[in-house]
Amino acid sequence: MDEQDLVGVWHLVSTAHINVELDLPDEDDDDSAVVDWLYGHSPELLALLEATDGLTLQVQADGSFRQTCNGEPAVEWFGANGVLEEKVVPFDGRVNSEGGEHFLLVPDLDWGAPEGEHEQATLRYDDGDTKICDRVALQGAQLIRTVSVVTDEAYGDRVVMAFRRATN
């Protein structure tokens, strides 16, 4: 899938969320559970999607994206600042392609900017305590957005959102 395939206006139609305690290895320097969660997939969540609406994601040809709310979508929402919000707080950013996948990033963060070349290309937020990977992919006619969060290197949240392309 090419990044240009994402260009357009997408409307949220459903979402699902899970929260887990990560199975951490005994070795202090082994971060495989964190990495696996951040970049993992949860296809079982697609069967648990519940209808919601009120969020639009617009992807531009230049790779920028913009989100807008028209209502109060029922979504577990981790804002641009890495905080679990009480309601959806839209933010803008850019789409970055890395290793055949597409990530939503927030440039110019005052705090929580990822360090390291790979992390800068794939993580939306990393303040040391909270890490967020925000990935989009086309699946049939839907855009599937997967937001994977690790807190304190021990707890994982994953939010899956399904969007449909706007028609004129």
Image (tube, rainbow, N blue to C red):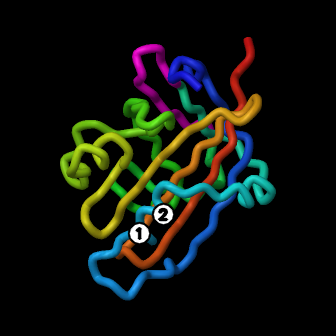
Residue bearing the label numbered 2: 36
Q: Identify the element where label 1 is drawn.
A: helix
Q: Which residue does the image show at 50% across and 61% down from the upper left? A: 86
Number of other residues with Cα within 10 Å of mark 2, as a class: few under 14, some 14 to 19, many 20 or more: few
Does the residue at mark 1 contact the one at mark 2 (Cβ under 8 Å)?
Answer: yes
Residue 12 placed where, x, y %?
A: 67, 39
Q: Could you tell whether 32 is left or right of 59 in the image?
A: left
**Per the image, is 4 magenta?**
no
Q: Identify the element where label 2 is drawn.
A: helix
Residue type at mark 2 is: Asp
Q: Which residue does the image show at 47% across and 47% down from the upper left? A: 134
Residue bearing the label numbered 1: 32
Q: Which residue does the image show at 45% across and 28% down from the upper left? A: 65
Q: Which residue does the image show at 47% across and 14% down from the upper left? A: 61
Residue 47 placed where, x, y %?
A: 80, 56
Number of other residues with Cα within 10 Å of mark 1, as a class: few under 14, some 14 to 19, many 20 or more: few
Nearest the viewer among 162 and 84 is 162
Q: CA distance from mark 1 to mark 2?
A: 6 Å
Residue 54 placed where, x, y %?
A: 65, 40
Q: The C terminus lies in which quarter of the figure?
A: top right
Where residue 137 sits, quadrant-wise, is: top right
Q: Could you tell whether 8 is left or right of 50 in the image?
A: left
Q: Could you tell whether 59 is left or right of 34 in the image?
A: right
Q: Could you tell whether 121 is left or right of 24 in the image?
A: left
- Magenta residues span 59-70
